[in-house]
Amino acid sequence: METPLRVAIVGHGYWGPNLLRNYFDLSDVWVSWVCDSRPEALEKAQRRYPAVPVTTDLDRVLGDPDVDAVVIATPISTHHPIALAALEAGKHVFIEKPMTADTQQACELVELAEDRGLKLMVGHTFVFSPPVRKVKEIIESGALGDIYFVTTQRVNLGLHQKDVSVVWDLAPHDISILYYWLGEAAQAVTTTGRCCIVKDIPDVAFMNLRFPSGVVAEIQASWLSPVKLRRTIVVGSRKMLVYDDTENVEKVKIFDHGVDFEEPEDFGEFQLSYRTGDIVSPKIQGVEPLFLEASHFVECCRSGATPITDGWAGLQVVASLEAAQASLDNGGAGIDLPEQALRARA
Ligand SMILES: NC(=O)c1ccc[n+]([C@@H]2O[C@H](COP(=O)([O-])OP(=O)(O)OC[C@H]3O[C@@H](n4cnc5c(N)ncnc54)[C@H](O)[C@@H]3O)[C@@H](O)[C@H]2O)c1
């Protein structure tokens, strides 16, 4: 039995308790601290896990030599200072998505983690979700052929955030899924949107991405919708696929549908042949993505392996969000992603 990895959870608001539950349940982890600046958030943690020490003092956590890794689930604007201090204190760091509030901050964290030989991982939770993993497997098998385009909808009557737009809140999920599936980051982004309810906080956004391979993608993100949609369509040259995360059982369906172009034999008109064949839904294991994500972070801290959702992956997503925000602010102008995002490990 290895000595447990000693983990501190920082931020116990809406999402932190989910991380705490999963780290607590891992047999090779010892939760050393739960830290939150609000005492009432700590009371909740203590009621559920009376043996876990709690504190409002982050310095106490970072100064504790018995902490190996820090898991950060605080608001986005605080990610950079907390992660920077944790890396400087020699701790491995897991940060919730999006990694930072801008690309410059993301670069600093990636460089510091590399300099210090510490693990930096980002909570792109969907990359650990079994249906998303299955779709990656299907794309890589070549079953869909060449990918033409992807459309994705993430809309519902969602909680309006006070400090960030819907782009920063919801789109990180779809961007991280797309980059994971396609193995590349977008090179340019255009985004239109609107502030329907709260001034200066867009609550609906339509984001278009163009990839170096030629793939194009659209992400619809909104906190204003009468129904909850979590649906992605991937269209390839051989087959098409629907991933619907609101489905209980058949979350992924592969359609043997397509259109084939036949060159004219003489100077006549070209022919199109339409194919509507079988629909297949692969079996998908039912494991909580957060459990797989937490296990992966612990495994990487122990083995030295690079996390799938490492700092570079986090940086690519942040750079894409920043580009989307710039496009939104400039009436839907096309914005190229910065060099670092394209050079980053995909
Ligand atoms: N991976 C996912 O699917 C997912 C889902 C929801 C939220 N998130 C992410 O989780 C993070 C937190 O979101 P949330 O909705 O839980 O926010 P929240 O506001 O509900 O909770 C944040 C908590 O952090 C505490 N906090 C703030 N500054 C602090 C500091 N300096 N030191 C210690 N504690 C501090 C607050 O008191 C609060 O309890 C965000 O980055 C968000 O994007 C991820």
Image: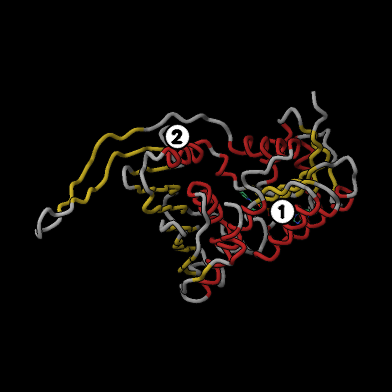
Return the x and y of residue 274 as percentages of the image width and height: 20, 46
Residue at figure coordinates x 38%, y 49% from the top left:
147
Q: Nearer the viewer, residue 119 or 329?
A: 119
Asked whether mark 1 lies closer than 8 Å to ligand 1, one says yes
Crowding at dot 2, Cα within 10 Å, few <14 / some 14-19 / many 20+, comes out as: few
Residue at figure coordinates x 56%, y 55% from the top left:
172
First in residue order: circle 2 vs circle 1: 1
Q: Is residue 76 visible?
A: yes
The reply, left or right, for residue 216 in relation to residue 165 is left
Q: Quadrant of residue 319?
A: bottom right
Return the x and y of residue 258 as percentages of the image width and height: 26, 45
Q: Is residue 260 above or below residue 104?
A: above
Q: Which residue is mark 1?
A: 74
Amino acid of disc 1: Thr
Q: Which residue is mark 2?
A: 248
Asked whether mark 2 lies closer than 8 Å to ligand 1, one says no
Q: Quadrant of residue 167?
A: bottom right
Q: Of all residues shown, which one is farthest toward the bottom? A: 330
Return the x and y of residue 310 as percentages of the image width and height: 66, 49
The reply, left or right, for residue 172 in relation to residue 146 is right
Residue at figure coordinates x 67%, y 52% from the top left:
311
Q: Is residue 216 visible?
A: no
Q: Is label 2 in a helix, a strand or a loop?
A: loop
Q: Is label 1 in a helix, a strand or a loop?
A: loop
Q: Is residue 92 above or below residue 221?
A: above
Distance in Å between CA atoms under marks 2 and 1: 30 Å
Q: Is residue 113 above or below residue 281?
A: below
Q: Quadrant of the N terminus?
A: top right
Crowding at dot 1, Cα within 10 Å, few <14 / some 14-19 / many 20+, comes out as: many
